[in-house]
Image (tube, rainbow, N blue to C red):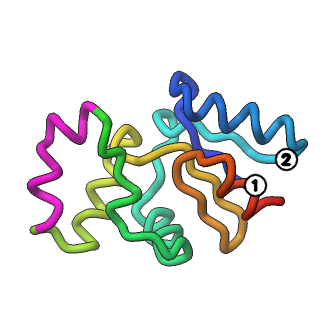
Amino acid sequence: MLFICYPKCSTCQKAKKWLDAQKIEYTERNIVDVNPTCGELKEWYSKSGFPLKKFFNTSGLLYKEMKLKDKLPAMSEEEQLQLLATNGMLVKRPLLIDGDTVLIGFKEAEWSEKLG
């Protein structure tokens, strides 16, 4: 199980505490040190069943600075995936990947249901 997070993010810290409390084993990866590749993002997106927009950190400073709310609708999926792969701060976190299960953001009820 791969847990991709930004250690300074309070939501990521909550998710990590929850995983530890559930005694769930995982490999932690700092999203800033090792940004997801375009290939990884493409695979996770296809497995997740979520719209691609859900992978964007829409509340992040970089998202707002780049005015992506206005730009994304005109971009192809491939262009959006390539953009996400340029900077980990554009990607919504935490991400939890386990085989075909992809969880984006931390919602305890959702994680309990998928991992319980």
The kind of residue tagged 2 is Glu
Q: Residue shown at 53%/48% (left/top)?
A: 105
Q: How many labels does the image show?
A: 2
Q: Quadrant of residue 79?
A: bottom left
Please state the horizontal and vertical placement of residue 57, each as a whole percent of the image. 36, 45
Please state the horizontal and vertical placement of residue 56, each as a whole percent of the image. 35, 52
The mark nearer the N terminus, 1 or 2, is 2
* Magenta part of the chain: 61-73
Q: Left or right: 75 with respect to 26? A: left
Q: Quadrant of residue 62?
A: top left
Is residue 85 part of the magenta span, yes or no? no
Check the picture and name the quadrant holding the N terminus.
Answer: bottom right
The label on residue 25 is 2
Q: Left or right: 70 with respect to 1? A: left
The label on residue 112 is 1
Pick the residue in front: 111 or 7. 111
- Judge whether 77 appears above or below 17 on screen: below
Check the picture and name the quadrant holding the C terminus.
Answer: bottom right
Q: Left or right: 24 with respect to 76? A: right
SS at mark 2 in the image: loop
